[in-house]
Image (cartoon, helix red, strand yellow):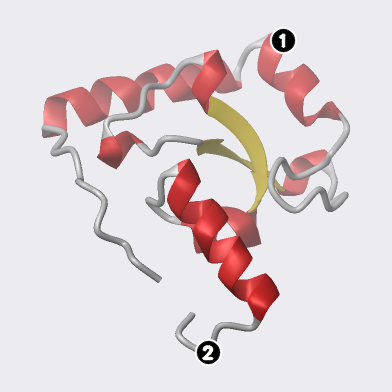
Amino acid sequence: MDMSYEIDIVNDEELRREKEKARNLRRTHWWNRKVQRGVCHYCHSHVGRERLTMDHVVPLSRGGKSKKGNIVPACKECNNKKKSLLPIEWEEYLQSLAKGDPDV
């Protein structure tokens, strides 16, 4: 799998600010509605709201922001596997799994 995407470098201060914004969003009615069904955005498994984590679709380390359009509920397994992949990289990873790619 080709992972030759350019990585944005995010400074520590910007990362700290974005993490604080994420913590604040986690306390909102908006986030509570997002996790209410208890379903992972990526694998669509019903894991229960208490087992969902907040995931940045475009990771903070890759220049993503802590705003509603970039945050989804994800099960811990998907969130851990996705790590800092961009959406297109994550899709490539999932497709390689479906094809049984031994390099994954």
The spot of residue 58 in percent (x, y) is 42, 35
The mark nearer the N terminus, 1 or 2, is: 1
> Residue at the spot x=58%, y=22% of the render?
26
Foreground tag (1 vs 2): 2
Residue 51, label in figure: none
Q: Is residue 103 above or below residue 83?
A: below
User: Which of the two residues, 48 or 68, is positioned nearer the viewer here?
Assistant: 68
The spot of residue 94 in percent (x, y) is 61, 63
| Mark 1 surroundings within 10 Å by alpha-carbon count, few (fewer than 14), some (14 through 19), many (20 or more) | few
Q: Is residue 26 left or right of residue 37?
A: left
| Mark 2 surroundings within 10 Å by alpha-carbon count, few (fewer than 14), some (14 through 19), many (20 or more) | few
Callout 1 secondary element:
helix
Q: Amino acid at mark 1?
A: His
Q: Amino acid at mark 2?
A: Pro
Which residue does the numbered mark 2 point to in the structure image? 102
The spot of residue 8 in percent (x, y) is 18, 38
Q: Is residue 16 above or below residue 90?
A: above
Callout 2 secondary element:
loop
Which residue does the numbered mark 1 point to in the structure image? 29
Q: Quadrant of residue 39?
A: top right
> Residue at the spot x=62%, y=32% of the render?
72
The spot of residue 63 in percent (x, y) is 27, 30
User: Which of the two residues, 25 or 39, is positioned nearer the viewer here?
Assistant: 39
Q: Is residue 49 left or right of residue 52?
A: right
Q: Quadrant of residue 17?
A: top left
